[in-house]
Image (cartoon, rainbow, N blue to C red):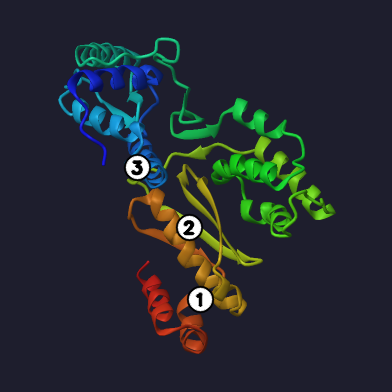
Amino acid sequence: MMEPLGEEEERVLKEFEFDSGKLVGELGQDFEGLGALLDTIRRMGAEIQGYKNSPTIFGEQLAKDLESWEPPPGEGQLLQYVDDLLIATLTQETCVDWTVSLLNFLGLQGYRVSQKKAQMVRQRVMYLGYEASAGQRTLGQDRKEAICQSPKPQTVKELRTFLGMTGWCRLWIYNYGLLVKPLYALITEGSRDLQWTKDATRAFDQLKKALMSAPALGLPNVSKPFFLFSHEKQGIALGILAQNLGPYQRAVAYLSKQLDTAAKGWPGCLRAVAAVAINIQEARKFTLGQKMTVLVSHTMSAVLEAKGGHWLSPQRFLNKIMLKSW
């Protein structure tokens, strides 16, 4: 069990950790989208870090301290992820006022912010590994180039490292699950040294090209309707979560996840239903429970009534029936 930190120990922890903090601002009006995105990243981080790591403890303490900060007049929002802070306001003047006020508050609380890493009053900022601007987010150029300059892996460990880096970018890559399938096939062969096939080499090159041409994604805005385009291919649930942008629809996230072993053995129409269930679950990380319009190639209710009872267990059948509520 971890013992409580004393006052002096806590101060040292704050100063050391918060040296990597960021203060950035003036990103436009999509405050809801930033909040939804941060909520998703926060939940993912909590699952990975647990509660034994010092960043988690520090982030919780910082959040408690920030509750007593009173922002100056003006419309804006402060977002926190562990020791990274982001200020989003509508005007440059408001951003400056909020930044000065927050810096003074943090100084009085014993925190220290890194001046070198701070990004002050910009319309485009690097935050949590991607470039955020008004209403959209893109992969950072440095991150893309670092991945694409990686040589072809020669061992399973090197390939896992490469797939780990590209996996972080999967939301920006259409059909990511299909692209990496030949690469994962190399890992399952059981050999420590990789035996590259033509399909795997082609997939490796295509993945790099897709990464360099990755589009900007819209920030999820819970005040606007969501649309989920879902289909299944080669045992992988593929989807596009989108929202309206003027007369067009802009992607918020590209989704891809493998079906479980049992679902892969179902007929194509039932695999499509299983893909919808998976994509809805993944999309909810961005929609925060808001209803969405799901577009799929099959009439789900008819498929379930005709074939569901023959192929699905009672529990699975009930879960798929519940999809009708969407």
Q: Secondary structure at mark 3?
A: helix
Question: CB of mark 2 within 8 Å of CB of mark 1?
Answer: no
Residue drawn at 15 percent across, 25 percent down? 68
Amino acid bearing label 2: Leu
Q: Which residue is mark 2?
A: 228
Q: Quadrant of residue 24?
A: top left
Q: Is residue 46 above or below residue 90?
A: below
Q: Residue at x 61, y 27 (%)?
A: 141
CA distance for labels 3 and 1 = 33 Å
Q: Is residue 13 placed above or below 205 in the rendered structure?
A: above
Mark 1 belongs to which amino acid?
Thr
Residue under numbered circle 3: 39
Element type at mark 2: strand
Judged by depth in the image, the label closer to the viewer, 3 or 1, is: 3
Label 1 sits on residue: 299
Q: Is residue 101 left or right of residue 268?
A: left
Q: Nearer the viewer, mark 3 or mark 2?
A: 3
Of marks 3 and 1, which one's residue comes earlier in the chain?
A: 3
How far from the left and from the top, in percent, is residue 136?
A: 47, 34
Q: Secondary structure at mark 1?
A: loop
Which quadrant, please, contains the C terminus? bottom left
Amino acid under disc 3: Asp
Q: Residue 270 at what x, y percent from top left?
A: 54, 77
Q: Residues within 10 Å of mark 3 (few under 14, many from 20)?
A: some
What is the x, y in percent for residue 82?
Answer: 34, 31
Q: Quadrant of residue 121?
A: top left
For this view, does 304 lie left or right of residue 31?
right
Q: Earlier in the sequence, mark 2 or mark 1?
A: 2
